[in-house]
Amino acid sequence: MKVASFSHQNRDSYGVVNNDGIVDVGRELGAKYAGLRQVLEAGALDELAAAAAGKTADVGFDDVTHLPVIGDPAKIICIGLNYDDHRKEGGAQEVDNPTLFTRFANSQVGHGQPVIAPKVSDKVDYEAELAVIIGRRGRHIGEDEALDYVAGYACYNDVSIRDWQRHTTQFTPGKNFVGSGPFGPWMVTADEIPDPQKLGITLRLNGQEMQKANTDLMIFPVRTLINYISRFTELEPGDVISTGTPSGVGFARKPPVWMKAGDTVEVDIEGVGVLSNPVIDE
């Protein structure tokens, strides 16, 4: 099942994506569950599926404003340097544990919404990533049970303002500019992705392939990330883990390739979907 968050006629909602568009399930369930985070908190994905069963789309997929899949996650935890070739292209040392940083929810945008190239930098870089959406609350989750805590998967573009990322050893400023976190176009429920380590991942900039890899190349796979993170914080329904990007990023190219106004950037993940965003100036 593909589940999307969207706005239509000045009303935010959520629904199930089918071949015709989106079944607006939020119209029926919105009084109980304000958004997809609340659906996950209630363990109500089956209720959402039942509400959409056998129905035709209420709105066309291209007739809505797409919102981030989870617009109000309690936590967005991003993983740095999780593909070895990307680690090497940046000259980083090997590490024994995952490199973590956080995003703010207000940095996120939905499918089709613009990435904003900020006034204060021209070093706007792309990063194709697999996002994991948590579906169950948990602490000290074992690797053998970690995938049972996943509600689904989506595409993420961890757009990075590279000079601000490197102002200090802390990544936070360069990873949290407004309009720098495309997330979508939908969540594919976990039952459709039995193994998140067997997915092709590609990024295209203006149709040109810039990144191409497979999630089996992650240094720390999804199971390990969930185990590690849950040992220091409680994972909650709706939390997002963006699992790192492969090699081919713009800063490592010679000459560097930076995104600019007028560009279109796409993250394409096998079995998940294609997340596409234009780039505009602030």
Image: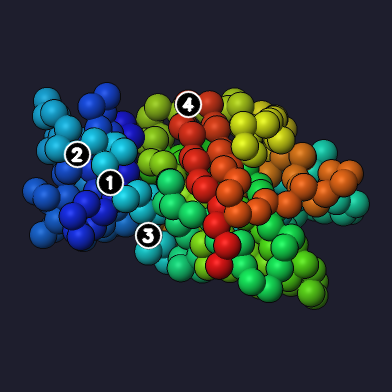
Q: Is residue 155 above or below residue 117?
A: above
Alpha carbon separation for disc pair 1 and 2: 7 Å
User: Does the CB distance between marks 1 and 4 fall below 8 Å?
Assistant: no
Q: Which residue is mark 3?
A: 71
The x, y position of residue 49, in whole percent, is 20, 35
Q: Which residue is mark 1?
A: 64
**Image depth: mark 2 or mark 3 in front:** 2
* Residue pictured at 48% horizontal, 26% vertical: 271
The x, y position of residue 240, in whole percent, is 48, 54
Q: Which residue is mark 4?
A: 271
* Residue pictured at 84% horizontal, 44% vertical: 253
In the figure, is residue 72 to the left or right of 221?
left
Res 261 → quadrant = bottom right
Alpha carbon separation for disc pair 4 and 3: 22 Å
Secondary structure type for disc 3: loop
Alpha carbon separation for disc pair 1 and 4: 23 Å
In the image, 64 versus 196, the foreground residue is: 64
Alpha carbon separation for disc pair 2 and 4: 23 Å
Q: Earlier in the sequence, mark 1 or mark 4?
A: 1
Looking at the rendered structure, the kind of residue marked 3 is: Gly
